Image: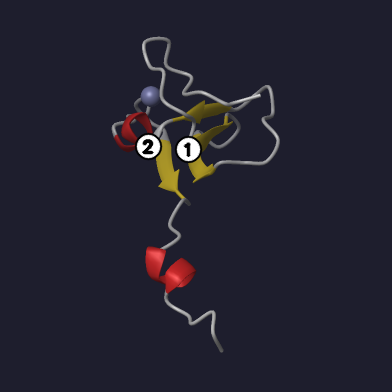
């Protein structure tokens, strides 16, 4: 089943998983997780990038996987 952005007005595919740590008031942005936990939400890149968190919460972006890490090494070696 395709995973879609959780925003009701958005039909884009989910690209990022949003994880709430209520105990520490932290919102994590992760690479799309393999299994969607019912507590989490998927967002498309556009909505993940424009995400704002409630006052007093921290936003931690852990999506950072540089493209060079994926394509920088030679597959012919
Ligand atoms: Zn979206």
Percent across and percent down for residue 72 are 42, 76
Would residue 26 be found to the left or right of residue 23 on screen?
left
| Closer to us: 51 or 77 | 77
**Residue labelled with disc 2:** 45
Q: Residue at x 68, y 22 (%)?
A: 38
Q: Are marks 1 and 2 in contact (CB under 8 Å)?
A: yes
Percent across and percent down for residue 19 are 56, 34
Q: Does mark 1 have its CB less than 8 Å from ligand 1?
A: no
Percent across and percent down for residue 16 are 49, 38
Residue 46 appears in which quarter of the rendering?
A: top left
Secondary structure found at label 2: helix
Residue 32 appears in which quarter of the rendering?
A: top right
Q: Quadrant of the N terminus?
A: top right
Would residue 35 be found to the left or right of residue 55 on screen?
right
**Residue labelled with disc 1:** 15
Q: Residue at x 46, y 23 (%)?
A: 5
Would residue 70 be found to the left or right of residue 33 on screen?
left
């Amino acid at each position: 089943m395709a995973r879609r952005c959780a925003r009701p007005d958005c039909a884009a595919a989910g690209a990022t998983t949003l994880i709430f740590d209520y105990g520490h008031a932290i919102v994590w942005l992760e690479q799309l997780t393999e299994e969607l936990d019912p507590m989490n939400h998927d967002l498309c890149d556009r909505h993940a990038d424009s995400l704002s968190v409630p006052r007093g919460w921290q936003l931690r972006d852990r999506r950072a996987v540089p493209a060079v890490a994926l394509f920088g090494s030679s597959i012919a070696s």
